[in-house]
Image (cartoon, grey):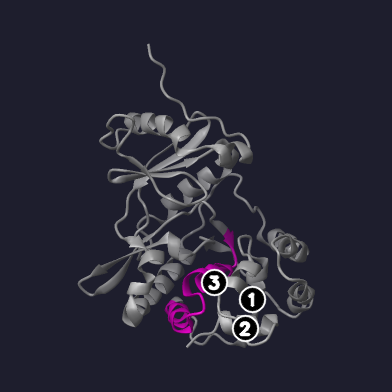
Amino acid sequence: MTSRPALPPAESEEDFDDLTDEDLRPGVAALCRDLGVGDLGVGGSDVVRFPGGSLPVYAVGSAVLKLFPPVHLDEFPVEAGVLAAVEGRLPVPTPGVRAVGERDDWGYVLMDRLRGESLETAWNGLGAEGRDSIATQLGEALAALHAVPVPEIDDWWPEDWDDFVYTQRAMCVARHRGLGLAPEWLAKVEPFLDGVDLPDGEPVLLHTEIMRQHLLVAPGDDGWRLTGLLDFEPAVRGAREYEFVGLGCSVAEGDARFLGRALRAYGYADPDEAFRRRMTAWTLLHFYSNVRKYLDRLPQPEEPTFESLGDRWYATE
């Protein structure tokens, strides 16, 4: 009897980084066949890997298969649990879950494939009216997301939000130094953070990586529509304004009109200077942020200060 092709071992980050699509494809095709999805020709020809992303994700007909190697298995229950929690609760579609399980020490989530193209590729063709529409829809979607009851997920990191913020604060300078932030900026991190009050509040459900690549859009009879919000494996429970780092730095990217419209749709009637200072602090503290790269990519502040940076990156109309 011929043995079933298996997914390869990936017990360390180095093992995972060394894997190629050729290494994964036989095991992925066998898993899809067992799950009954796709019209799998010779060698799994119907299995198409999406480019980019930190985890392997495959389109298989009308479904999407997302894989979690052993080294990232802790992210698997978060994706599955949060997708189940948000299904049908947001004004933007999220992938419906078809199957969840483990195979060869890998986790997998089989989900519906949503229509639309990445906002990253569609952005330049939207025009002002299209961007206005997407901004409003996104702000409404984030408000709805933050109103979803936080699901119960075992061993969900971080267990305590206040401890997480404390740790991020303590290692902030060292972390950004490691990411290559210039010394003249590093010297201003501690004084700036010391002057910003981040208020307490009941933690809400956060996506944490709101970015153009995780949003799908498509044209409709009434203009451009937001047709998908994807990739929930980095979701956490935390302060709602933490979410807006992605909105500002990875979606609006200095577009004050877009950011202002999204925030007003969320419920911020008049984002003020204090809001911009808090958002700059969250940008420094965010687990996935890289201020050095943002300085290379986003509009330059008028002065080399974090106050000026916040006035530029979190400006609203």
| Upstream in sequence: badge 2 or badge 1 | 1
Q: Nearer the viewer, mark 2 or mark 1?
A: 2
In magenta, the rendered stretch is 237-265
**Residue 121 in view (yes/no):** yes
Res 301 label: 2
In which image quadrant can residue 120 be found?
A: bottom left
- Secondary structure, mark 2, is loop
Res 165 label: none
Q: Dot 2, crowdedness within 10 Å: few (<14), some or many (≥20)?
A: some
- Where does label 1 land, which residue? 280
- Where does label 3 land, which residue? 249
Point 77% across, 72% down: residue: 183
Is residue 147 or residue 63 the one in the foreground? 63
Point 41% across, 71% down: residue: 138
| Upstream in sequence: badge 3 or badge 1 | 3
| Upstream in sequence: badge 2 or badge 3 | 3
Amino acid tagged 2: Pro
Q: Residue furthest top?
A: 1
- Secondary structure, mark 3, is helix
Is residue 187 or residue 80 the one in the foreground? 187
Q: CA distance from mark 2 to mark 3?
A: 13 Å
